[in-house]
Every structure is written in structure tokens, then in C-alpha cells.
Image: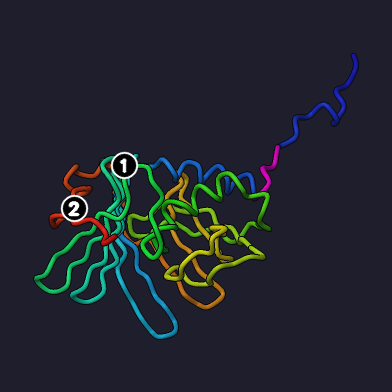
Amino acid sequence: MTACSSSSSPKATVTPPADALAALAAQGASAVYTATYAFHQVSPDTTATVKVWRAEPSMRVDVVAGTTTATLLLTSTGSYSCSITGAKRSCLLVAAAGAPVPAPFDVAPANLFSADLHTLATETSSYDVHSAPARPASGGVPAAQCFDVSSVATASPSPTGSPAASARVPSGRYCFTAAGVLAAASYPSGNTITLTTLQTSTPAPDAFTPYAKPTPLPS
């Protein structure tokens, strides 16, 4: 009888970090969920709550700080920039459906859940990607796989900065759940955004309805 050689044993395949990141980002670009994040900016010392609703083709991102809420709403009828200050609510129609959102409205942290996902899903070869320590599951938030992403053309080390025209993803550490939902991001500046609650059910349709009568941008 001929003995089996060790060379016939199957070998485990290892997915390169860039490919793993691209696959998770692609999942995140079409994921359906409602999530809440804690955002901390180091300088000036600022904290805010970021709320995200996603159900393709719609997305809503609220940044809540004190009594002020800033909202970017992308829907099949158009894109809206809205705000709540005390009892005052207002909305602007900033782009037609499918049209690019003009600056200064197309800014992070909304980009973390839209443009950055598409870039990481399709252009990871433009970045230096390394595996980073995973985040364990905690308090209902799933475990997450993390990656250190380096970009030589970083627009800003902060999730509140405006991206450059090239829409480069800022250098930092990005963590995603197995479903592609952003679990955390941290930057060389010390700024962080961390997932605190997650619901994977489809958001209610009124989540994507402007909360004030929209007016068009002044021409």
C-alpha cells in the first residue's frame, strides 16, 4: 500500500487583508440597518451622537450635539440637508435624485457610510491595508474585524473633515462587523467613532422623509 504523503493534505487559504476589507465594505454598501455611534473629537474636545439609517437606495445620517441636529438625507426623490436647532426645523433640497451632493454638504461622517464604503470596496489597491486586532462583541454590538488603512493623499484625519476632490479615504483604523456594518473608526488625530447600538431590521419609511418642507438651494 502506498502511504499518503503530507503534500496531499489540503492547505488553508488566507485572504489578504485588502481583499477581506473590500468584501466587508461591499457588504456594508448595501446593508440594511439602524445604528447609533458615539463620536469624539480631540481638538477642540467635542462629543456627539451619530445616528445612521440605511435601506438602499436611501440613507440618513444625523449628527446630534446638544440641542442641535445636522442631517444628510439621500433618497430616491433627492438629497436633503436638514437641521434642528431647538424648536426650529429646516431642510434644503441640495441635489436631484442620483446627482452628486455638492460641497459643503457631502462631508464626513456621512462619507463613512457611503462614499468611503464604495471606495474601500473597489479601490483597496490604492491603499496600504494591514490586519489589526479584532474588536470583541459587547453589549449587543457584534464582533468586528479591523484593518489599518494608510492613504498617501489623506484629506483629513478626522471624520468631520471635508474630503478632497479625489475622495480619498482618510488614513486610520476601520472595523467592520461580519455584515459589513462599520463598528469603529479611529484616526491618527485621536478622533474616534464607535458603534453603540445596532438594529438590522429595515428602518421605517418615515426615517427617510425630510422633517421640514424642503426648499431648493439658492441659485
Q: Any magenta on residue 168?
A: no
Q: Secondary structure at mark 1?
A: strand
Residue 153 sits in which quadrant?
Answer: bottom right
Q: Secondary structure at mark 2?
A: loop
Residue 214 sits in which quadrant?
Answer: bottom left
Find the magenta span and give its range.
13-17
Residue 49 coordinates in the image, percent (x, y): 30, 68
Write down the residue under mark 1.
55
Amino acid type, mark 2: Pro
Q: Residue at x 55, y 64 (%)?
A: 170
Write down the residue under mark 2.
210
| Helix, strand or loop for the magenta stretch, by majority | loop
Name the residue at the right extreme: 2
Determine crowd level at label 1: few under 14, some 14-19, many 20+ residues with C-alpha closer than 10 A: many
Closer to the chain start, of discs 1 and 2, is: 1
Query: In the figure, is residue 58 to the left or right of 206?
Result: right
Query: In the figure, is residue 141 to the left or right of 65?
Result: right
Above or below: residue 126 compared with residue 187: above
Above or below: residue 11 compared with residue 74: above
Q: Nearer the viewer, residue 192 or 11?
A: 192
Amino acid type, mark 1: Ala
Q: Any magenta on residue 14?
A: yes
